[in-house]
Amino acid sequence: MSQTTSARTNRRGGSRTSDAGPRAKFSQLLPYLFEHKKVLSVVIVLSVLGAAASLAQPLLVSQVISVVEKNGPLGVLVWALIALVVISGLISGYQHYLLQRTGEGVVLSSRRRLVARMLNLPVSEFDARRTGDLVSRVGSDTTLLRAVLTQGLVEAIGGALTFIGALIAMLIIDPVLLGLTVLVIAASVITVVTLSRRIRVASQKAQTKVGDLAAAVERAISSVRTIRAANATEREIAAVETDAVGAWKMGIKVAKISALVVPVAGIAMQVSFLVVLGVGGYRVASGAITVANLVAFILFLFMMILPLGQAFGAVTSVNAALGALGRIQEIIDLPSENQFDRQFAPDPAIIVGPANASVNPGAAAIAFDDVHFAYAAAPVAAPDAAADAPSARARRREAAAAAASADAVAALEGRDIVAEAEADPSVEQAAAARAAGARHAASDEAAGQIAFAVDDAQPTRSTGPGTPVLRGVTFGAPRGKRTALVGPSGAGKSTILALIERFYDPSAGVVRLGGLDIRSIERTALRAQIGYVEQDAPVLAGTLRDNLKLAAPDATDVQCVDVLHAVNLTEVLERNPAGLDAQVGEDGIMLSGGERQRLAIGRALLAAAPILLLDESTSSLDGKNEQLMREAIDAVAENRTLIVIAHRLSTVVDSDQIVVIDHGSVIGTGTHSELVESTPLYRDLAKHQLLV
């Protein structure tokens, strides 16, 4: 799976993106514009009409002067000139509205693409990236695309017609004056082209700094209670200010370069005007041209310089947009979680219930067959990484596709899919290095085991071998039974559940569901059969109803109330007159830790999946609520397969099967009484908890 084009540390802080960030080409901007080609066609037609109306005005002015010199009647000429001015104004106003509307449409379509891709990225990408930076790409970077339309790109098309028309008219009036004007304009164009390259680079870096700032603010706000409790408020303010100053400095740099570009058109206009006025006055005095011709020439000069200013503005806005588009495309170009799954020729949606005889009725609901899993070592970007990023990304995509095809053949033939570390950069694995960082640091993956993801868009060299998390794990979870996973922290228990959910794929070995390699089952079909309660029991901002119906959108209010009663959240339901519409706050902050855990369990129970994964699901509950929760789980456990992780053995001693995990390996399987006799580690754990 591809990774970022810039080296990052984990989402909780650390180093920022490298200065050699992603850059977009103008061709990558065109699809966003072509989505609105009908409206843009109207805008272009209006630009042509506006250019024609503008070009006609100097000609009429010239005729008016000639008529005045001859003391002739003005009549129709004056009314015609007024009509042209009014028509030109109306066209310009309507054109501006269409461009603004289309600009908003471009922002909307870019946000749709970005969000759709972002929410379909492999889980490992979110482990590797900072939330604030991703939010910044959706909110800030996409907004810059609007400037492409509202600040001159399309208007520059009409301006180009005006420029060419004025150029031809000036050539007809006086080639000498035109030659002098072109020399001045050519110098200004060369200046702008030179500066525009620096604008694109500076704009991209400025957006990166804005992303850093958003990430820092998100980090500080999401952990505000921890920060205050640690008396670290001032230090966090200083850290955020550092990022804010960094964004300010890059913004100033962009402003300095833009400040060099913006006056160029004005300077060109002034110099051209002075040259034309001086030389033109001399030529009028010498009789080479008339006063009317000189006035018309000056008016055409203004008309030629104005679109030139629009073109310079378009260069600035387009380069700024391309810098932002590079950050947008960096995410959009990443492969989605299931991009290569089609290589496995997935079976139709499979229901894996205990009474379902259509899918290997004798097979275990979940089985691990010699499963190995390791996090990659932290990468070190090669010096020429930025220059080689596109080709590196392409090579890795080819390698991923090849590996996926090879695995598909193995799956279809019924053989175990054992992928070598260097030949399995599938969508779920290439960036698995940072997988355990945010989710499992507190229990399942020790801090020393957390590694960073390989940056797939850059050539990298490994700093050492990956850290093994699972080593040859083999066990089966019988259908309709309760299997408990126990062992010390950092043994790999939560990683086992993550592999079942296909958040990551094993480095070697096979995970099976109903006897089938889960890589041969569509992810949506696989996850529809699994209810998962994570260790930190996340609660989404919104209402109680929103959280409960996340996995069961068709559930009725009656069902929601029933499941709240089952998990002993009746008090939460009754203490707020809004009932199911009661807000739970950001990350469920308006609920206690135990209430958040019970709500997460209620969400899983409401989904009524045939397989239920519980990762320390009662760790935050008191004795009374834990007993109520066990009763609720027992009530729905009939004919369902449960895989439970627990550190308190008292909650799992009555399980049908207990699997003891230590240092990523299975060291014992059996019932409580059997393991007390056969497995020293389990016996020690039981003794410490006064169970023997």
Image (cartoon, rainbow, N blue to C red):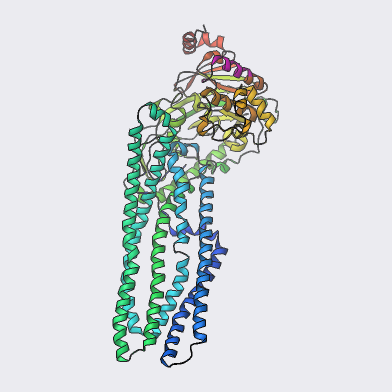
User: Which quadrant of the view contains residue 148?
Assistant: bottom left
Q: Is residue 629 magenta?
A: yes
User: Which quadrant of the view contains residue 196?
Assistant: bottom left
Could you say which is closer to the camera, residue 230 or residue 475?
Answer: 230
Q: Position of residue 48 (x, y in %)?
A: 51, 73
Image: 686 above or below 528: above
Could you say which is closer to the camera, residue 402 or residue 468?
Answer: 468
Residue 11 visible at all: no
Image: 533 above or below 627: below
Image: 499 above or below 240: above
Q: Is residue 287 left or right of residue 403?
A: left
Residue 40 visible at all: yes
Q: Is residue 605 left or right of residue 508?
A: right
Q: Is residue 390 magenta?
A: no
User: Which quadrant of the view contains residue 651?
Assistant: top right
Which residue does the image show at 41% across and 28% down from the upper left?
226
Give the magenta part as a residue range: 619-631
Q: How many callouts does the rendering have? A: 0
Which residue does the image show at 54% across and 20% down from the upper left?
618
Q: Position of residue 24 (x, y in %)?
A: 42, 54
Q: Position of residue 390 (x, y in %)?
A: 41, 51
Residue furthest to the top in view is 692
Q: Is residue 373 left or right of residue 15?
A: right
Could you say which is closer to the camera, residue 58 or residue 207?
Answer: 58
Name the dominant secondary structure of the magenta segment: helix
Q: Position of residue 73 (x, y in %)?
A: 48, 90
